[in-house]
């Protein structure tokens, strides 16, 4: 598919995913690296309460809060 056709189809809201090769696609600045952090028990309990209240995981809460701080 030529670029002009791709652009016009995309702009028209047509599905162009069949012509994309996303096998090696990467999201910039989204590479993950595992880290270990020790928290006091009271902090874990607080994280778990907030996670339950929002219906998400403890890890999600930590990621959002750390992400806001940066």
Image (spheres, rainbow, N blue to C red):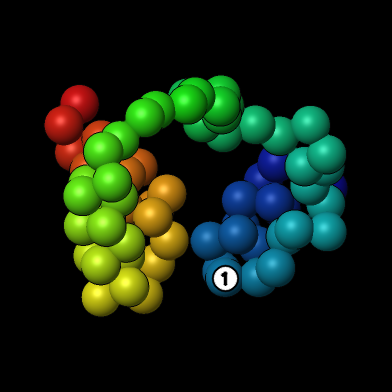
Tag 1, which secondary structure? loop
Q: Residues within 10 Å of mark 1 (few under 14, many from 20)?
A: few
Quadrant containing the C terminus is: top left
68 relative to 47, above or below: above
The residue shown at (51%, 31%) is 30
**Observer-nearest residue: 66 or 43?**
43
**Observer-nearest residue: 5 or 13?**
13
The extreme left residue here reads 69
Q: Residue 52, how many percent across, how many down?
A: 32, 73
39 relative to 57, above or below: above
Q: Residue 59, how many percent across, how many down?
A: 42, 49
The residue to which callout 1 is attached is 13
**Observer-nearest residue: 15 or 5?**
15
Left or right relative to 4: residue 55: left
42 relative to 27, above or below: below
Left or right relative to 54: residue 28: right
The residue shown at (65%, 70%) is 14
Q: Residue 48, how many percent across, how many down?
A: 32, 61
The residue shown at (83%, 59%) is 18
Choose top left, top right, bottom left or bottom right for residue 23: top right
The residue shown at (39%, 55%) is 58
The extreme front residue here reads 41
Q: Residue 69, how many percent across, how many down?
A: 16, 31
Left or right relative to 32: residue 58: left
Is residue 54 shown to the viewer in this render? Answer: no
**Observer-nearest residue: 48 or 11?**
48
Is residue 60 shown to the viewer in this render? Answer: yes
Choose top left, top right, bottom left or bottom right for residue 45: bottom left
């Amino acid at each position: 598919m030529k670029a002009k056709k791709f652009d016009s189809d995309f702009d028209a809201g047509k599905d162009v995913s069949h012509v994309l090769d996303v096998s090696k696609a990467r999201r910039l600045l989204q590479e993950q690296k595992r880290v270990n952090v020790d928290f006091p028990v009271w902090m874990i309990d607080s994280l778990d309460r907030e996670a339950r209240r929002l219906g998400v995981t403890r890890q999600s809460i930590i990621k959002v809060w750390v992400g806001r701080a940066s």
